[in-house]
Amino acid sequence: MRYTLGRVSTVVAVLIVLPCAILMGAQEAELVQDVSSEPVSAIKATKISDQRKVDLGERLFHDPILSGKGMISCASCHSLSQGGTVRLPRTIGYNGRMHRFNAPTIFNVAQNYRLGWRGNFTKLEEQNEAVILDPNLMASEWKTLVSALSAAPRYSEEFSSVYGRSIGKADVIDALVQFQRSLDTPGARFDRYLEGDEAVLTAREIRGYELFKSNGCASCHQGRNVGGNLFERFGVFADANTEEFLGDTIMDDGDLGRYTVTHLNEDKGVFRVPSLRNVDVTAPYFHDGRTFSLDQAITIMAKLQLGHELEVEDVSDIAAFLRTLTGEYKGRKLANE
């Protein structure tokens, strides 16, 4: 049986109404927490059906052969040793052109229903092909890429062994996707808490989780990936692109969000809600990487999305909770090296 501490709060929920605990006067009350009703659920590792495909996909993911100029790999922007991203506000593509968006983490990517900051993909297969062909990302083309892979003895032999045929586009995509589906990070302390380990969190971390719920954060950041499945406007209660919130951020058309896909005025500034899994090791934050500080990111989100001015202690406690979402990959807790 689990007990948590909470307080009375009026929740401004954008999409769903969430249960919250109650504090009677100045006296703390212990309440039974029903895990099945929690907005966040524990993540489970995806079962690997063919390890050979995962291993092949991992080699491709780290090989510059996938890029048109042989200069960058998928891991150049999604480093597994840096939380599945890189510590840059926006990465730089071919010909020195800055990318529109901060590189989202590749970890737990298969748990997201919507992919990319604009949420314009729902299938990893489609997103991978788009990245390979994008002139400012991998800048490749299938005829040249398949030819280069076929000319490499190791790949020629391995694709033949794994897929039983000569190298083709569909198999390249499949290998990459099989690897990416293996990048789940179970074992977070918060998941262990949800699974019944009462002592794994501190009172401060539990209070941070209650604040996360009672302030309405979990209205958009919920489910297994604590986000990744909804769209929301960035700047509900205030303009996100004012000096107060921008800092030194350079604006570009990426700030238009889904508008660049749909060209609908109502989609200006609308983005996919990001996952908060491993958020402690995936800075900088937001679509434009405007801050490296988790506390500042929480403060900005409270003002822009919830219309709340949080106390410093509350921000610190929510951050403490978010740090419990850091999971493990290959048996080791993620870190940003």
Image: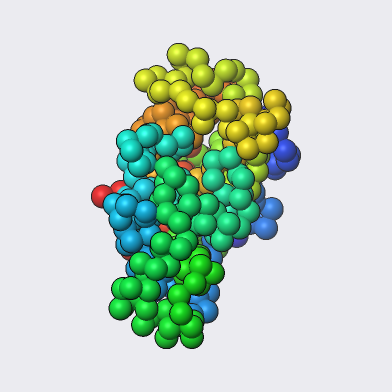
Q: In this rendered view, identify the residue nearer to me: 53 or 171.
A: 171
Residue at figure coordinates x 37%, y 55% from the top left: 67
Number of numbered discs on residues: 0
Q: Is residue 9 visible?
A: no
Residue 33 appears at what percent x and percent y? Answer: 63, 52
Horizontal and vertical percent position of residue 7: 61, 34
Q: Position of residue 62 (x, y in %)?
A: 33, 61
| Colouring scheme, one of rainbow, by chain, secondary structure, one colour | rainbow
* Of the pair 257 and 110, the residue shown nearer to us: 257
Residue drawn at point x = 38 percent, y = 34 percent: 98
- Considering the image in quadrants, where does the N terminus appear? bottom right
Quarter of the view holding residue 102: top left
Residue lying at the far left in this picture: please name it.
Answer: 337
Q: Quadrant of residue 221?
A: top right
Q: Is residue 272 left or right of residue 283?
A: right
Which percent across, then down, holds residue 77? 36, 48
Residue 318 seen in this snapshot: yes
When the figure is inspected, residue 134 is found, relative to residue 267, above or below; the finding is below
In this picture, is 71 found above or below 247?
below
- Image-based side of 187 in relation to 213, left or right: left
- Tell me what residue is drawn at x 70 percent, y 25 percent: 265
